[in-house]
Amino acid sequence: MSSEIDGAALAVFVFFFLLVTVMGFLASRWRQAASLDHLDEWGLGGRKFGTWITWFLVGGDFYTAYTVIAVPALVYAVGAYGFFALPYTIIVYPLVFAVMPLLWKTAKQHGHVTAGDVVRGAYRSRALELAVSATGVIATMPYIALQLIGMEVAIKALGLTGEVPIILAFLVLALYTYSSGLRAPALIAFVKDIMIYVVVLAAIVIVPSKLGGYGAVFAAADAAFLERGQGGILLTANQYLPYASLALGSALAAFMYPHTLTGIFASAGVNTIRKNAILLPAYTLLLGLLALLGYMGHAANIEVQSNNDVVPALFKYLFPSWFAGFAFSAIAIGALVPAAVMSIGAANLFTRNFWKVWVNPDVTAAGEAKVAKITSMLVKVGALLAILFLPTQFALDLQLLGGLWILQTLPALVFGLYISWFRAPALLAGWVAGFVGGTLLVWSDGLKPLHTFSAFDTQITLYTGLIALVLNVIVSSALNLVLLSKGDARGASPRGTG
């Protein structure tokens, strides 16, 4: 891509970035509460977000700036395999419809703000609470870094180089999150999602018309993969199982992250969640259309040093400068919403399940809010330092591990909603087995998301996170049977009030 600054694109970018900055600071007055000095208000928006606000907020922090960059980049690199994100976002919503209303009821009834709160209330185990909370924080950190990487790609496409632009964008994000809490990304999500829809719908109509139609796009992509000798526009037979396991494992992990749970806990009620489980698949359609940009990159003969540059290069090549600036601003704003929610989710976990438990049990509600605000700033600083001083691949590798790690919190968080059989020591042992075993497996495979089992002449390849989850459940169940056989009543009914 050209490194020259495009004045028209930059002007459009700056206009929309300033627009959402103003909205971010004004958000503290939107649906204004008596005070934001309470985690329910600062960190959950008062638990009053209705159907449309929740739809934009959850969609905004689930379909992120890095999604806009990375999904087409993966399709550009490997072809059909990159479309695994589509079935995973189809699978996830029935799970949301079935599980999340019950989780919301539990959280609302007992004043829980985080997954750690829910686990403590269910099992009355500080150790299990700490394990779940720590997992949420460390899995979220690289996710925030990826949003800043997505923003960095968009800023560089404008011709801006150096660290100053990304630092300034970070400061804006940090300041309005501190002042407005969850209300800021909820309000900005309206603008962000509308902009992304405009960009993608324009692209799927205009780009193919300039490249000879969709037939030509698919033919060009197929030819490019054949020339490379890897990838393709169709899955091969040996890709079916790993593709399906990636989709299933990713779906199970998606709503275990602190930022997606924050959106759920901020909802006004169970009907809001159910309606969103029905409406959110509209984003899956958007994602599928977005993924096609990877094939369009081949049809346009785009050559890039990094696959992540495919989308910006395509827009710079085929669209006028003003629309390219609009697209880049949509991507950058698309980083602000999830990064803000992620930092809030991580801050809520640290405040409720570490600071209040281990440092200052007598902290007031206002004190909790202050600690959370400061922590949200520090979390973003950590993510910024990571992308400034560490290789991008480091953040990608950590995000791969983050998905595996957060998946190991599912048994402790979800099983207790339905059955009272499991005990805390058993779930903690399962978490250790899945967390450590899965990490070692990924490390032994060279930080790859898939692991291959070989037996005789048969090879089976599966998503490592799913393998780790199976190990987690087996260890938890086996130890639980041992505890029950010994009459161990610890971690009594998971329906405890905490």
Image (cartoon, rainbow, N blue to C red):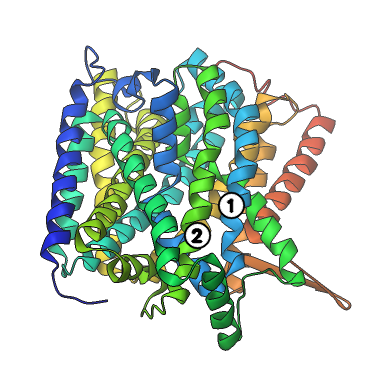
Q: Are marks 1 and 2 in contact (CB under 8 Å)?
A: yes
Residue 355, given in percent of the width and then of the height, sits at 35, 33
The residue tagged 2 is: 291
Give the residue displayed 54% in from the left and 18% down from the top.
270
Within 10 Å of disc 1 (Cα), the crowding (few <14, some 14-19, many 20+) is some
Please report whichever mark, 1 or 2, sits nearer to the chain's N-terminal start.
1
Q: Which residue type does callout 2 highlight?
A: Ala
Q: Nearer the viewer, residue 284 or 213?
A: 213
Q: Nearer the viewer, residue 171 or 207?
A: 207
Q: How many marks?
A: 2
The residue tagged 1 is: 86
**Residue 92 located left or right of residue 143:** right
Q: In which quadrant will I find the N terminus?
A: bottom left
Work out whether residue 375 can be spotted: yes
Residue 485, given in percent of the width and then of the height, sits at 84, 32
Residue 276, given in percent of the width and then of the height, sits at 52, 29
Q: Is residue 6 above or below residue 300?
A: above
SS at mark 2 in the image: helix
Give the residue displayed 65% in from the left and 23% down from the top.
494
Q: Nearer the viewer, residue 412 or 169?
A: 169
**Residue 109 located left or right of residue 473:** left
SS at mark 1 in the image: helix
Give the residue displayed 42% in from the left and 20% down from the top.
50
- The quadrant holding residue 111 is top left
